Amino acid sequence: MQSLTNRADKMAEIYQKNENIAGVLLAGSVSRGWDDSHSDIELHILWKKPPRDRDRLQPIEKVNGEIIDFHPYEEEEWAETYIVDGVKFEISSFLVSTIQEVLQQVVQQANTNYDFQCLAASLKDGKILFEEERTLSALKEEVMAYPAALAENMIIENLELGSRWNNRKALLARKDWLMYYDLMTAVQKRMLGILFGLNGMYVHHPAFKWLKQSTDEMKIVPDQLYERFTSVLTDSPEESISTLEGVVGEVYALVETHYPHLPVTEGRKQAAFTRPVHP
């Protein structure tokens, strides 16, 4: 059976026959070596000018693919999904100029937008299957050095946990589980935002997919973070609060160590506060 990487290579050979295509990039879990039996093949197609529907359909027809969805241009992207011999392909097409603008936002302006960072992460970690005139290689070079300003912005934007965190014990006492676990996951995502910044890693999925693999790559991280985050969602609610409070405190301590000039003290103080209980 062909590997997913080999299947991606064969599709890239078909796409590159279109002279309007400047590059084909293998992205997602397959490019990072994280793929499993549930994984799709994600390809980013870079175009010199807007593709016609025919340009997008011809490669699918060439391999007798079964189209699952075929979206019009929206949010500066053309997207389609199809299945070939039991394997799903997810195609995201962009103009080269669009990618350049996104990287300008992330690298030069330190914009923390997760969708933008996902593109930067795909370029950094992705495998070039085809390119003209070093188009993709040049874009890769732009994202190799993680911007110091982006790290600080990621930390600052996630230090404040919000008033709902101060009500965590009230939610527990009331057994208000839907809101309680929504809060638990929201705070976990805040901590991950800080840690991605601390470790100079672009966010590769807006919902922090592949969490174990991501935390395994981190050098600055609380001990056994993945296991502790898992226990927040699987242990008793009483234990989950204590576990997450411990993680929050350790993450703030890491920020104080590595970015002592940032306003951590106030964030730590607010995070420690809980809503008072009256008779």
Image (spheres, rainbow, N blue to C red):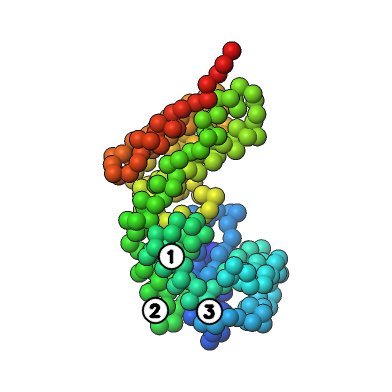
187 to the left or right of 258:
right
39 to the left or right of 257:
right
Q: For mark 1, what is the residue?
A: 105
- Residue, far bottom: 19
Name the mark on residue 47: 3
Question: How many marks can you see?
Answer: 3
Name the foreground residue: 69 vs 128: 69
Seen at 48% across and 76% down, the residue is 97
Vertical comparison of 11 with 208: above or below: below
Local SS, label 2: loop
Q: For mark 2, what is the residue?
A: 134
User: Which is more N-terminal, label 2 or label 3?
Assistant: 3
Q: Quadrant of residue 195?
A: top left
Vertical comparison of 163 with 4: above or below: above
Vertical comparison of 268 with 236: above or below: below
Query: Which amino acid type is marked by label 1?
Result: Gln
Rounded to the nearest angstrom, the CA distance separating label 3 from label 2 is 14 Å
